[in-house]
Every structure is written in C-alpha cells, then in structure tokens.
Amino acid sequence: MMHATTHSPRPTTTEQDNTMDFSLTLNGTIDPTGADPDGPPMTEAELRENLESAVLKMMGEGLITRATSGALERYEPEVKIASNTDTKNINFTMTLTGTIDPTGAASGGSPMTRAELRLNLERAILVVMGDGLITRATSGTLERYEPQVMIANPSQRTAEITSIDQIRDGDEATSFALDGLVHDAASEMASNANNGGAREQVEFLRTLAGWDDDAIIKAFNDASEEG
C-alpha cells in the first residue's frame, strides 16, 4: 500500500504561506480483456498495483517539479476501483494531492509558477499514458481516461467557514478544497449505479447526469459500435 509523505511542517495561517497545493485526478475505464480476449482478464489487484507504480514513477523521476526551483513538500495518493457487473469493465479514480514549495529546491532561483506546475502535472499524465503504465503486460486496455488538474494557494483562504454561502461563493482555493469531496461523492454514486445493474444505471444517467432518453440511446449505440 502507498503512504502519504510529508517532508516538513506546514506554516500556520498566521505565517506567510507561498506554497501551492495541487490535486491531480485521473478517472478511467479498463476493458480487462481488450488486448487479448483469450488471455486472463486484468484484475482489480493488477490495476491497483499499476496505478500505485505510476505514482511512484511520477515521484521518482521528479515529473512534478522537473527543472524548476520547486520542491515537493507533501503528497498523498489515493486509488479507488469499482467493477461494472454488466460490462465487466473496471472503473478507476486515481487522485494525487500534494504541496509544492516554489523555491524549496533553490532559494535563490525564480519561484516555480502555477503555470509550470500545471504543465508538469499534465505532462506527467502523458508520460503515464504513453508508457502504458496503467495496463502494462496484462490483457487489459485503457478504454477511457479523463485527467483534471487543480492548483490553489492555501494562504488565499485562512478564515474558518461558518456558512454554506461562504463555500458556494468561494474563490479558486475554495473550489480546490471541494474538488475531492465532489469526486468522492460522484464516484460513490456512479459505483452504486454500476453495481445496481442496467435499471439503476439508466436512472443515474437520467436523474444525476441530466441525459434525456435520446442521448442515452445514442451514447449506448455509439459505445456498442466502438466495442
């Protein structure tokens, strides 16, 4: 199992805090026998191991900071996996949250910028995809993936939240804090729908995704033709 890594204590809200918090989320779907219909299906355990190895590659090769003055102060990986009982596909969500000290690697250099951090995170996903790190030497194929990057400075928001209006009308830092909550809630609802069979899945698409019947039929037929 992977564990969170913390290199140094974070400043309190009364100190100047120039660090950048980031969240990298990768949602995807695996066809366990897409590369070899006659071979042994890729398992959830293999997928989890591959996703955790992909995070270690990002860390070990310095893909988050690259040639900048930034230093990775903290990172916390999380992997969630759920099989679809109807399609036999495996859905996954890999989330990597962390904190960057913009001048931690070179105090006299130019601080790492948000734009550099965002570009590095997006490139890190391309490395993971290009090297086939999600499926590796299995019968599985990556059918779909959706990356999302969020960056915020924790010093933007120091006051305690006392009302829902403060959250709803919040800035980028507030949105960053909500990002994980929304993904967790959506992932749980999607997993419940997938585990409930076709009736629950259609109801999910209608009620929560806001799709009408024509959109569901078209998307289903398109997916069937691709398969």
Image (cartoon, rainbow, N blue to C red):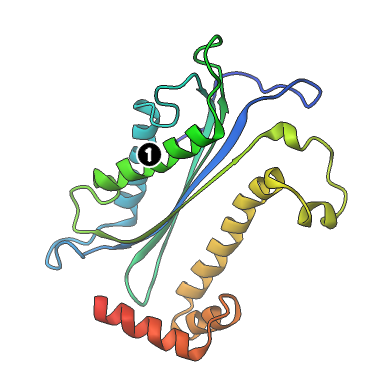
Look at the picture and state if 227 lies above or below 153: below
Asked if residue 167 shows in the view, the reply is yes
Task: Please state if 160 lies on the left or on the right of 73 as rendered.
Answer: right
For label 1, the residue is: 124
Q: Position of residue 12 (x, y in %)?
A: 76, 23
Expressed as whole percent of the image width and height from the top left, the position of residue 162 reads: 88, 48
Q: Quadrant of residue 16?
A: top right
For residue 11, which quarter of the picture? Answer: top right
Q: Is residue 227 visible?
A: no
- Screen quadrant of the C terminus: bottom left
Could you tell me which residue is drawn at 25 percent across and 76 percent down?
Answer: 226
Name the side, left or right, on which 17 lies relative to 182. Answer: right
Amino acid carrying label 1: it is Ala
> In the displayed structure, does residue 31 sit left or right of residue 9?
left
The x, y position of residue 35, in whole percent, is 17, 61
- Residue 74 placed where, x, y %? 55, 28
Indicate whether 184 appears above or below 213.
above
**SS under mark 1:** helix
Location of residue 221 with respect to 174 vertically, above or below: below
Residue shown at the point (37%, 39%) measured from the top left? 124
Residue at (53% x, 18% y) in the render: 110
